[in-house]
Image (cartoon, rainbow, N blue to C red):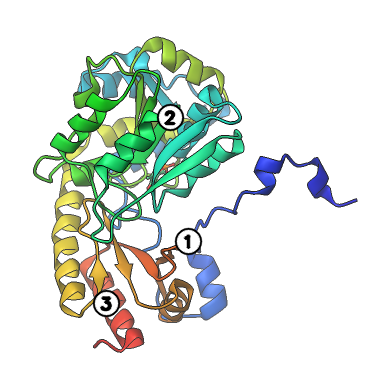
Amino acid sequence: MPFGKHIREEVRALTPYNAGLTIEEVKAAYQPASIVKLGSNENPFGPSQKAVQAMNALGSSIALYPDPLARSVGAALAEKLDVDPQTIIFGNGSEDLIGAVCRAVLNSGDVVATLYPSFPLHEDYATTMGATVERVVIGDDFAIPLDALIEAASRAKMLIFSNPMNPVGAWLGSDAFRRLIGSLSADTLLVVDEAYFEYAALEAGFPSAIEELKGSNLNWLVLRTLSKAYGLAGLRIGYGIANSPEFKSYLDRVRTPFNVNAAAQAAALAAIGDDGHVQEGVSYIRSERARLMRLLTDKGFRLAPSAGNFLFIDTGQPCDVVATALLKSGIIVKPWRQKGFHDFIRVSIGKSEDNDKFVSALLAFTQKS
Ligand SMILES: *Cc1c(COP(=O)(O)O)cnc(C)c1O
């Protein structure tokens, strides 16, 4: 008997997540001389050494279950962000919390609005619940169409998008963000995914959704992660700030009780205490990003200004062809396979010498050198 008949229709319709290749997979398939991993927006400088030490210091205490509420990390974040610790929820990566909020609020037939091209999990977890996803497509100028977003949100049970937007890098500034939240009804749950907040926070007029939403009458959840600027992607820890302890307590009921492991909690606590490490990485990446943006624009590529640690590039040819050619040179990028954006790749900003390797390989392949 084919197994598919046991599977819910919503699940059968899902596309497998495009997680990108691991270093081991690329080694096995292409045997390149060296590998540059620019496919998953990781921090090329890695985590704070304080985080590594804290994790190593756990010793045999890993025999015990972790704190199901990650209270020590929560207390540190509550102080840093000036929020009630009872409104902070942790996830096995922030993606875990995207799933939790969808399970907690969505019924079959509900409408979810999001930006497109999208972070696929914003759509997939909603689709799994039977919700209908309404995509608001970015403009040809890569700008977020605010009026269309407001209009779509007015019909949605939930509005979820990342700011800055992955994969494009575009963002809503304070004025636009205030107009959006001013237009929302309390019937629409707002989920703002700020996975790249630490990179974007230095842009003039970039809004902290937490600050903007504090004190509003809306229902909201802001997601952040330690996977990107904090360099802890392998440990899997992200967090959400909800508008109330009540909302947070419902999210707790739809996650697994020990979703954040002891190593992640120990490392996160130390990492949060080492702002210097994050800020050093952020300023390096921002200056490299500007350099790359200029280089590629000069060579005639169409790309979006980005507030994240990545660039979204129109290569003028099918993304899988370009990505495979780059893999042969040992460079991993993310081919963007969503409809309408098949010619785009998303490349993470890495160390200067690695970015140069990427640019030379791309120019050689596209014959723009
Ligand atoms: C990377 C990313 C995440 C996932 O981060 P984890 O905390 O590692 O799960 C969530 N949202 C967006 C938009 C991302 O780009």
Q: Is residue 199 above or below residue 72?
A: below
Q: Position of residue 22 (x, y in %)?
A: 50, 62
Q: Nearer the viewer, residue 332 or 103?
A: 103
Ligand 1 near label 2 (Cβ, under 8 Å)? no
Q: Residues within 10 Å of mark 1 (few under 14, many from 20)?
A: few
Q: At x 55% / y 18%, what residue is drawn?
A: 253
Indicate left or right for 295 with 71 as reference.
left
Q: At x 28% / y 71%, what residue is drawn?
A: 354
Identified by mark 2, the residue type is Met
SS at badge 2: strand
> Circle 2 is placed at which residue position?
158
Estimate the spatial distance between the alpha carbons at disc 1 and disc 3, rounded to whole Å. 25 Å
Q: At x 65% / y 49%, what residue is drawn?
A: 13
> Circle 3 is placed at which residue position?
359
Work out whether residue 255 can be spotted.
no
Q: Nearer the viewer, residue 141 or 239?
A: 141
SS at badge 3: helix
Q: Residues within 10 Å of mark 3 (few under 14, many from 20)?
A: some
Mark 3 / mark 2, whichever is N-terminal: 2
Mark 2 / mark 1, whichever is N-terminal: 2
Q: Position of residue 100 (x, y in %)?
A: 51, 28
Estimate the spatial distance between the alpha carbons at disc 3 and disc 2, rounded to whole Å. 39 Å
